[in-house]
Image: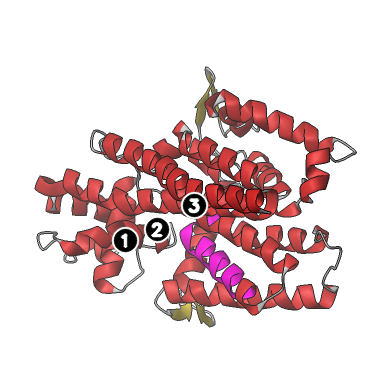
Amino acid sequence: MTSRRGWTDCVRRLRWIGIPALLGLLLAQMAFSSVHKSATFDEPYHLGAGYAYLRTGDPRLSWEHPPLVDTLAALPLLLRHDVVLPLDHPTWDQADIVNFSDHFLWEANFARAPELVIAGRWPVMCLTVFLGLALFLALLYFSGEPAAWLGLALFALDPNIAGNGRIITTDLGLTCFFFIAVWRLGAYLNRPTSTNLILTGLAAGLALCAKFSGILVAPVFLLVALLYRPPDGRQLSLARRAAALAGMGALALLVLWAAYGFEFGPVGETGLPVPSPTYWRGMIAVYQRVQASTPTYFLGQSYDAGPWYYFPAIFTLKTPLPTLILLGLGLARILSPTPSALERRHSWDRRHPAGLLPPPYKGAILMAHHRNETHGETLTAPDGQ
């Protein structure tokens, strides 16, 4: 008993040292490299839309991306008194996010543009660190201490995380909240408390507010709720699971509505008023853009649309070899018909739908639509790291 208590105390002390060390290393990589990187193509648009929303409360520029990550990125700009918001520019009345944001950053604030971009990256970097902490806690909950440390180490040392986590985009924000939502759903199905239900609904709502593809949380939730079997074998009735999903969905939509300032109006020029019409207008516009072909240059050839194997190839080329090797070993272990002695001893569920379903579901959606996006898009598979 004494030796077990001593081991537990040692592990707890290791967490207080190891977790800050790994996440601090990740933050240092992002912070020190960020100051040497110029603005990417998308960053002015996220920063301009977020700052305009914070200053005016008007979400008119948030039709291409939901406002959550944009407004988080723009928060440091509120601490400055020299930022000019050109609301008299005609692109503001036209809700032209591209030209308004270009004018905002490169003309109205040209002298301080690099400082504004670097300042706007800090909230995204902090969100990336928060995702790492959530990853550790989720793995600790479902798979135990060794898996949690291994997952956190792979996350903190992954160049894709450091590269995407230091720029103002919505990819890491969606990854963070989507991951937390599925994690908390699994926790609710294990222990159906009101706290777990509320946390799941809030996280799902934040995923919706981070990026339009956050809507995929709905079918993923449905699949997990239908297929998951708790370790103790006591599964909730179908009616109770359906009621819980309805409650989570209602809370998620309330969070989305709050993110748009409780906006209420028609989606088009005419029609019935609905909550968050800007969100639904943006969803329609993004869907139409996805359906249209986008010229793509990939592996020496030009395509009218991205080839179906774009994301598998990019994932294979850009993912570190240790992660790919461990992924292969993990898949082999999952497909094995019998659990290992270690799994039996710790009652680990290696086929937990909360971890297994989202990545292939997301990958199938991306390949089916031949999306031509950045590698950051693949981060939104909740346990992709």
Q: Is residue 361 above or below residue 190?
A: above
Percent of width and height locating residue 385 = 57, 40
Coloring basis for residues: secondary structure
Residue at the image position 85 percent from the left and 41 percent from the top:
339
Residue under pointer 2: 69
> In the visual, does 249 lie left or right of 202?
right
- Magenta highlight on residue 313: no
Q: In the drawing, does residue 132 fall left or right of residue 82?
A: right
Q: What's under tag 1, amino acid-wise? A: Gly
Percent position (x, y) of residue 383? 62, 46
Residue 133's disc is 3
Amino acid carrying mark 3 in the image: Leu
Position of the N terminus by quadrant: bottom right
Q: Secondary structure at mark 2?
A: helix
**Residue receiving disc 1:** 50
Query: How many angstroms separate mark 2 from mark 3 (CA)?
Result: 18 Å
Q: Tell me where residue 146 sits by quadrant.
A: top right
- Label 1 environment density (alpha carbons within 10 Å; few <14, some 14–19, many ≥20): many
Residue 382 visible within the image: no
Q: Are the two marked residues, 2 and 1, in contact with CB atoms closer than 8 angstroms?
A: yes
Q: Residue at x 46, y 43 (%)?
A: 18
Q: Amino acid at mark 2?
A: Val
Residue at x-position 19% and y-position 66%: 87
